[in-house]
């Protein structure tokens, strides 16, 4: 079967770090174009706007949308309308309603829509899910702390309304949580710490619970030194304390290491997208984004010190 002709839209950090190498290394794809206002990709056709690219290159079968969430809907809508398969970076949109519109359009056009959640493809995530499947869970604590200056330098969009602030990485934790826990949970309380000169939170503390009252807490904080970066989910069970660490790459139970693997998230994501396209299916899951919406709905706001890059 011929490789899928694909284009990348929004050539920024994640496109360069992960999407382009993953596409390049997967024989199931052929990168044919890129659309970005400032960025470009060597060796393919480059455009500054997605609509120009779609008009000029009807051979494009699929697009990966790697721009910030606030501007993803427009591009996704245009691509789906043009009959292209669409790979959405996380979060799949700035609102739940826009993703519902995209899902319906993909169905109507008979093309694939993929809401990718890269952290779910961390190598220790499936082992963690399998471990928890038959355990009694007593409590869950999520610690998602990082140095924003290291990971998001000069990303103004991330601090704007809809940019999600600390939830840009924090939603990765929720994407894992919603995948590995055998029961659903809901938000009961949240505190959003918002710098006085920004619209999005720099830190947040969240309480969730399951229907039977199992507590889940999340501490997300961008004000750490990079030496204190921590992306851990700690689950107390009847069979010991499970720590899914390093953003989903490492798994231990009562201190005994069960998995500690190299990251392969994006190659696996592209393999999944390929399978979906070939099978004529979509995969649309908004569970992590729904939690973020609930966190904002219940959130008490605390104004904190201004943040400057
Ligand atoms: P980024 O470095 O800022 O790149 C995004 C690109 O989108 C920009 O370079 C820009 O390219 C384009 N863009 C189009 N409209 C834009 C607008 N209104 N404002 C800003 N940029 C705009 O961001 P990123 O880190 O790659 O993140 C992009 C998406 O990937 C986000 O949803 C993020 O959550 C997700 N993601 C990021 C990472 C990471 O480690 N950085 C990891 C996983 C997922 P042009 O100016 O050339 O158009």
Image: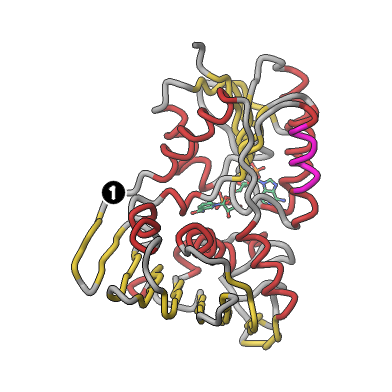
Q: Position of residue 66 (x, y in %)?
A: 60, 43
Between 292 and 192, the one nearer to me in the picture: 292
Residue 153 appearing in the image? no
Between 230 and 185, the one nearer to me in the picture: 185
Q: Is residue 64 magenta?
A: no
User: Residue drawn 53% across and 50% down?
Assistant: 117
User: Residue drawn 48% across and 63% down?
Assistant: 182
User: Residue drawn 57% across and 81% down?
Assistant: 207
Q: In the image, is the residue at mark 1 within 8 Å of ligand 1 by its beta carbon? A: no
202, above or below 119, in the image: below
Q: What is the magenta range?
A: 100-107
Residue 117 appearing in the image? yes
User: Residue drawn 37% across and 68% down?
Assistant: 135
In the image: residue 227, left or right of residue 150? left
Q: Residue furthest left?
A: 256
Q: Position of residue 149 (x, y in %)?
A: 49, 68
117, above or below 128, in the image: above
Quadrant of the rendered image containing residue 155: bottom right
188, above or below 63, in the image: below
Q: Which residue, given by chain and number where applicable, does mark 1 sit on?
A: 262
Q: Position of residue 275 (x, y in %)?
A: 51, 28
* Crowd rating for badge 1 (residues with CA inside 10 Å; few <14, some 14–19, many 20+): few
111, above or below 284, in the image: above
Q: Main secondary structure of the magenta part?
A: helix
């Amino acid at each position: 079967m011929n490789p899928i002709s694909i284009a990348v839209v929004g050539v920024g950090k994640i496109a360069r770090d992960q999407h382009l190498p993953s596409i390049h290394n997967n024989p199931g794809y052929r990168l044919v174009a890129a659309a970005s206002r400032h960025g470009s990709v060597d060796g393919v056709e480059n455009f500054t706007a997605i609509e120009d690219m779609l008009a000029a290159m009807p051979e494009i079968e699929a697009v990966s949308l790697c721009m910030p969430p606030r501007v993803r809907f427009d591009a996704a809508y245009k691509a789906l309308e043009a009959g292209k398969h669409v790979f959405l970076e996380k979060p799949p949109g700035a609102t739940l309603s826009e993703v519902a519109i995209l899902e319906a359009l993909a169905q109507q056009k008979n093309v694939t829509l993929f809401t990718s959640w890269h952290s779910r493809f961390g190598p220790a995530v499936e082992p963690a899910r399998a471990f928890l499947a038959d355990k009694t869970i007593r409590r869950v604590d999520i610690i998602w702390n990082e140095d924003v200056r290291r990971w998001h330098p000069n990303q103004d969009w991330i601090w704007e309304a809809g940019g999600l602030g600390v939830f840009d990485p924090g939603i990765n934790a929720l994407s894992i949580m919603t995948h590995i826990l055998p029961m659903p949970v809901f938000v009961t309380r949240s505190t959003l710490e918002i710098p006085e000169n920004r619209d999005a939170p720099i830190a947040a503390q969240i309480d969730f619970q399951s229907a039977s009252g199992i507590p889940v807490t999340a501490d997300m904080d961008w004000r750490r030194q990079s030496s204190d970066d921590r992306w851990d989910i700690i689950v107390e069970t009847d069979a010991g304390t499970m720590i899914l660490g390093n953003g989903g790459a490492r798994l231990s139970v009562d201190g005994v290491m069960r998995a500690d693997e190299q990251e392969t998230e994006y190659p696996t994501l592209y393999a999944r997208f390929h399978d979906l396209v070939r099978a004529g299916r979509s995969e649309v899951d908004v569970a992590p984004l729904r939690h973020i919406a609930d966190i904002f709905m219940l959130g008490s706001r605390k104004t904190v010190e201004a943040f400057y890059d």
